[in-house]
Image (cartoon, helix red, strand yellow):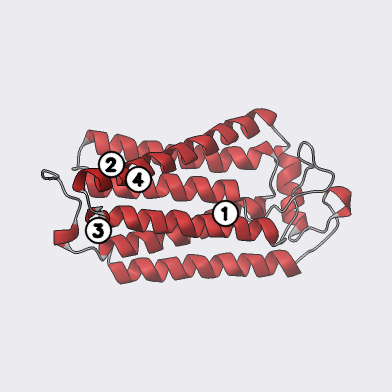
Amino acid sequence: MKRNLKFILSGVFLGLFLCLILLVLTVDVAQIGPAGTSIGLSSLNGSVLSSLGRSDTWYKVTKLLGYAAFGMVGAFVLVGAVQWIRRRDLKRVDRQIFMLAALYAVTAVLYVLFEKIIVNYRPVLMEGETFPEASFPSTHTMIAVTVFGSAAILAGVYMKPGKIRSILQILCMLLIGVTVGGRLVSGVHWFSDILGGVLISIALLFAFSGFLAGVKETDKPNSGPEN
């Protein structure tokens, strides 16, 4: 896929995400949430929630997968630190690692932003809470899709074509699918929350892939001696 097309697709998914925010804020808003909270797209969100119910098991599974995502972030931070130490120069750390760090930083900023900006409230009261928390987008979904998705992309950069690379990329996609599906059936988010998390994540991943495509051939990961 050409670099410009990746940026265009990033913009398309960002636009879809912003449109979803507008819909949630203005369409079919009704007091169906706990503590009388008003929820956008209430008919759709309410019917999906009533159909799927709530699962504490899936909530715990997705929570563990969230920890796995943070573990993967730590692993890539370690890769960057090792390159810095071995090459004795921060500028010699692979540009792909710097780009990944920028992706993580943007994701972290969005996480904090949407914890403060209330678009929708959770459909349940979480343990220890007296009032529903912010729910849109599902930041858990956003983090999982962005982290596992970027890992799959980087596997294609750092690894030669073969079974191992394919297995790792498929594993990343499975982790994304289980997290997204599990978060939905856990019942701690509305359908629109999960959809929002997926849309913003895809926008970020297309942008990340576009920037990676801009790395010159001579700037590709150093596979030779690090001296």
- Mark 4 or mark 2, which is nearer the start of the sequence? 2
Report which residue position mark 2 lands on. 82
Looking at the picture, how far across and down is residue 31, in whole percent?
Answer: 86, 57
- One can see residue 165 in this view: yes
Q: How packed is label 4: few (under 14 Cα within 10 Å), some, or many (20 or more)?
A: many
Inter-mark Cα distance, 2 to 1: 32 Å
Q: Position of residue 135 (x, y in %)?
A: 69, 52
Q: Measuring 63% from the left and 42% from the top, which residue is drawn there?
A: 184
Residue 152 is marked as 4
Tell me which numbered mark, 4 or 3, is placed earlier along the sequence.
3
Q: Earlier in the sequence, mark 2 or mark 3?
A: 2
Query: Dot 1 lies on which element?
Result: helix
Badge 3 element: helix
Residue 58 appears at what percent x and percent y?
62, 32
In the image: residue 7, left or right of residue 66: left
Q: Along the polypeptide, which appears first: circle 3 or circle 1?
A: 3
* One can see residue 199 in this view: no
Foreground tag (4 vs 3)? 3
Marks 2 and 1, the one that precedes in the sequence: 2
Q: Is residue 200 left or right of residue 91?
A: right
Separation of residues labelled 4 and 3 (CA atoms): 25 Å
Give the spatial CA distance, label 2 vs label 4. 21 Å
Q: Please state which of residues 108 and 31 is positioned toward the viewer in this rendering.
A: 108
Q: How far separated are the C-alphas under marks 2 and 3?
A: 13 Å
Identify the residue under disc 1. Answer: 197
Picture residue at 83% right of the left edge, 48% below the top:
131
Q: Residues within 10 Å of mark 2 (few under 14, many from 20)?
A: few
**Disc 2 secondary structure class:** helix
Question: Mark 3 packing: few (<14 Cα in 10 Å), some, or many (20+)?
Answer: few
Q: What number is the disc on residue 91?
A: 3
